[in-house]
Image (tube, coloured by chain):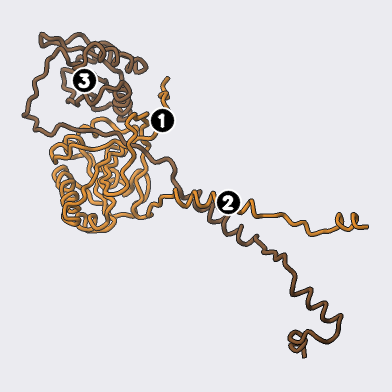
Amino acid sequence: MKKARSIKKPGVKIDMTPLVDVIMLLLTFFMLTATFKAEMSENIEVKLPQSVNTDSTKLPEKDVMTLTLTPKGDIYVDVDNFKVRKAVFGNEFGIGVYHPDSTGTVKTEYEQTGKIAGKDVKRKVMVLNKEQFEKTLSDLRLQLKNMTEGKSDFKIVLKGDKDADFGTVEDLMSSLKTTKNTRFSLVTDYRAEKPAGQ
Amino acid sequence: MAGGDFDSGGGNDRFKKKKYNKGKKVGVRIDMTPMVDVIMLLLTFFMLTTTLATPQVMQINLPKGDEQDKVKVDMGNVLYIRVSDKGNIYFSNGLSTGTEAAPENVAFENLRAKLESLYAKNNNLLMLLKFDRHMKYTVMVDILDEINKAKIERRYSFMKMEEVDTELVKKAGG
C-alpha cells in the first residue's frame, strides 16, 4: 500500500538548484566579460586582416583615435571621447571622412550615396580634404590634451579593410607623418599559427 | 475566540492539534521558475551582446625625421622587398657597390624561411618595403606578420614604389 501510493504521486518535483547555480555562473561570466557599444558611436564595419602577431598587444580601451579604411578607399577619423568630438566636429557624434585622392575628383562613398560601408548613417559626417584632415588629426589630439591637462593622449589605431588598396594606407601614413603621428597600430584579427594560405 | 485559542493553548484537543501541525511545517518550497526565467533572459541578453574576440594590434613606428633627413646605410645590408599589384613578392639584395641584384620571386610560403636565412647571414639586414599602390592592404599585414614571426625586430621601413620599381617588377614577371 505504501509503495503504490508513492508511485501514484502525481506532482513530480525537479530540484532546480543545480541548474540555477550553473546559469548564475554563466550569467556572471557574461556580465563581466561583456563590452558594450553605444549605438550612436557604432563602429564602421570592416573585414579586418588576420595576423598571428607575436607581440600580442591588445587594443587600447580608452583614448583611442580610430582611422577606418573602407574598401572604397575612404578614411574615417573618429575618437572615443564625445567631448573632443563636440569640440572638433561640432557634434557629439561627429565623424570625419577623407578620400586621399591626389586629384580630389573622387568623391567619398558618403558624398555619393549618403551611406557608410553600405549602411545608413546616424552620425554627423564631416567631409574633409587633405589639409582639413591633417588639421583634424592634430586638433583632436590637442583638444584631448587641453581637456585633460596633458595627462592623456590618443593612441592611433588603423582599422583597415582587407580589400583596401595599399595606396590609401600609403597616403594615410604620409599624412600621419606630416602631423608627427609616428606611432600607430594596425588592428588585426587573431589567427592561429598557420596562415590560411598554407 | 480564535486568538484566545492561540494564546492560551487550551480548548478542543482536535482543533489544537490541527493548528499546531500547520504552524510547524518546516520544508518551505520556493517556486524557482520565475527566477530561472528571468535569469535565462538575462543570460541570453548578455550572451548575444557580448563580443569576445577582442582584436589585437600591430605596432608600427614611422621615422620621426623629415624627408630631407637622409640616413646613410651600407647597401650590402639592404634587402629590397618589392610587391607587385597582384601581391607577388620580389626580393633583391643590395650590393656593397651601390647597385642591387636582380629581383627574385619569393613565394609567400617561403617568405619567412628566406628572411630567417638572410637574417642569419647578416644581422644588420635592413628591409626596404616597396609596395605597389594597388596591392591589397591584407598583403601588407601578412608580410609584416611574417617579418615579425621571423623575429627580425623592427628592421624594416616603408619606401615609395617608384616608376623604376614598377618597371623592375613588371620585367620580373609582375
Q: Position of residue B97 (x, y in %)?
A: 10, 8
* Residue at mark 3: B127
Label of residue A23 in the image: 2
Q: Amino acid at mark 1?
A: Arg
**Local crowd size for mark 3, using a 10 Å CA cut-off: few (<14), some (14–19), many (≥20):** many
User: How far is mark 2 from mark 3, CA to CA?
Assistant: 54 Å
Rendered orange, the chain in question is A
Q: Chain of mark 1?
A: A
CA separation, marks 1 and 2? 31 Å
Q: Residue at x 59, y 49 (%)?
A: A22
The chain identifier of the residue carrying mark 3 reads: B
Q: Quick check: do tags 1 and 2 share a chain?
A: yes
Which residue extends farthest right? A1
Question: Which is in the foreground here, disc 1 or disc 2?
Answer: 2
Taking the image as shown, residue B125 lies to the left or right of residue A195, namely left
The numbered mark at residue A191 is: 1
At numbered mark 2, what does the secondary structure look like: helix, strand or loop?
helix
Residue shown at 21% from the left, 50% from the top: A152
Most foreground residue, A172 or A157 = A157
- Which percent across, then down, holds residue A195? 40, 24
